[in-house]
């Protein structure tokens, strides 16, 4: 990108259009594939930075650790490691083979990504593969764009996170159920935000005595816009007898007799139903639920709630 002599370079760079690269991974402490990918990605970015600047682009790298099934769902994570440029995977397929490192981490057999470049397969993406993808993105050439079916957590990742939880002894987390009559709005929001902010403290469920054909679509839209979670893909309306026995029950504020579910601790959050109201009501409700979810996690962690 040419600019007038003496023009502040910082201002020129600030005016450049970002080229966003996301690096999604499971582990950067002992996984050779993730560590090798991080190293080669860094070198590829260094090699392509000047070319990017010459085309009016600035490369922005965002590392994203996928430390839970909830984060995998949030980021539509299919395989580790993953490199995306402007939201597009640099390789359209998801070939995998056994990864001894991640197997050691979680305690069971797990597959991780295998890359292919110039007719050969690699456990770590070659620098040339990455620089080629960056150049294509800068030159506005379309990267491979596979069809996007509704995301479902891959069995391989489900096995990894389950085994990891078992190994770390986290299977004894208390179970919390958020319940209301229809399980279509507030309780669904509470389940989603609990999985986002408190999955390391408790297992979250939601249910009701009746169900709706779909979750409240205004709630779905607000939660997706504000938190990046698509409840249409990750949740559905459920009856109380469809979820496991729980330790804690949170009623949302039913304005009538709330559903009953056996538990060791019960509390009511007294939330007004935003259904049929403007977005501001949904945003307010979402923020209240977020705050209450974080406070509930704190009280469980600090053992302020007595559980056997």
Image (cartoon, helix red, strand yellow):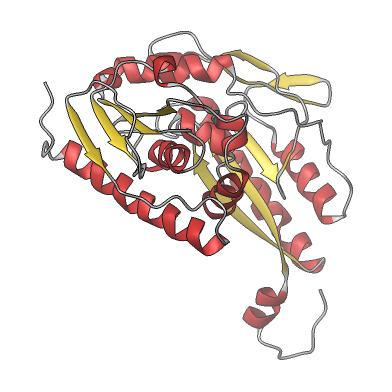
The x and y percentages for residue 280 are: 52, 64
- Whole-percent x, y for residue 26 in the image: 48, 30
Which of the two residues, 231 or 84, is positioned nearer the viewer here? 231
- Decide: is 29 above or below 143: above
Of residues 127 and 165, the one drawn nearer to the viewer in this rendering? 165
Tell which of 73 and 46 is nearer to you. 73
Task: From the viewer's perspective, tell me whether residue 269 is left or right of residue 52.
Answer: left
Pick the residue in front: 214 or 10. 214
Can residue 149 be seen at all in this image of the molecule?
yes
Location of residue 297 by image quarter = top left
Q: Is residue 89 left or right of residue 187?
A: right
Asked if residue 201 shows in the view, the reply is: no
**Residue shown at 68% from the left, 42% from the top:** 84
Which quarter of the rendering shows the N terminus? bottom right
Question: Which residue shows up at 62% across the image and 40% down it?
Answer: 40
**Looking at the rendering, in which quadrant would you find the C terminus?**
top left
Expressed as whole percent of the image width and height from the top left, the position of residue 253 reads 34, 44
Relative vertical location of residue 111 with respect to residue 295 in this rendering, above or below:
above
Q: In the visual, does 206 lie left or right of 145?
A: left
The spot of residue 76 in percent (x, y) is: 62, 34
State the image quarter where residue 187 is shown: top left
For image coordinates 84% across by 36% down, the residue present is 144
Quarter-wise, where is residue 139 in the image? bottom right
Instruction: Look at 79% across and 89% down and name the residue there.
Output: 4
Residue farthest top in this picture: 109
């Amino acid at each position: 990108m040419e600019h007038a002599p003496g023009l502040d370079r910082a201002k020129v760079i600030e005016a450049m259009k970002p080229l966003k690269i996301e690096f999604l991974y499971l582990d950067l402490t002992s996984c050779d594939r993730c560590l090798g990918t991080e190293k080669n990605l860094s070198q590829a970015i260094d090699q392509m930075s000047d070319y990017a600047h010459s085309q009016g682009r600035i490369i922005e790298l965002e590392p994203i650790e996928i430390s839970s099934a909830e984060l995998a769902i949030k980021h539509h994570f299919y395989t580790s490691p993953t490199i995306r440029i402007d939201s597009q995977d640099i390789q359209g397929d998801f070939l995998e083979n056994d990864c001894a490192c991640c197997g050691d981490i979680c305690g069971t057999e797990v597959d991780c990504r295998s890359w292919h470049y110039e007719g050969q397969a690699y456990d770590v993406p070659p620098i040339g593969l990455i620089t080629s993808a960056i150049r294509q993105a800068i030159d506005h050439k379309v990267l491979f764009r596979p069809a996007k079916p509704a995301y479902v957590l891959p069995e391989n990742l489900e096995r990894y996170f389950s085994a990891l939880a078992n190994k770390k002894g986290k299977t004894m987390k208390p179970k919390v159920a958020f319940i209301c009559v229809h399980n279509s709005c507030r309780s669904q929001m509470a389940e989603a935000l609990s999985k986002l902010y408190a999955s390391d403290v408790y297992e979250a469920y939601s249910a009701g005595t009746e169900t709706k054909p779909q979750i409240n679509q205004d709630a779905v839209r607000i939660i997706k816009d504000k938190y990046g979670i698509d409840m249409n893909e990750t949740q559905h309306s459920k009856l109380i007898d469809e979820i496991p026995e729980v330790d804690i029950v949170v009623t949302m504020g039913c304005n009538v007799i709330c559903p009953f579910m056996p538990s060791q601790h019960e509390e009511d959050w007294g939330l007004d139903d935003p259904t049929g109201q403007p977005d501001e009501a949904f945003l307010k409700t979402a923020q209240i639920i977020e705050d209450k979810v974080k406070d509930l996690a704190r009280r469980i962690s600090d053992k302020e709630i007595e559980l056997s």
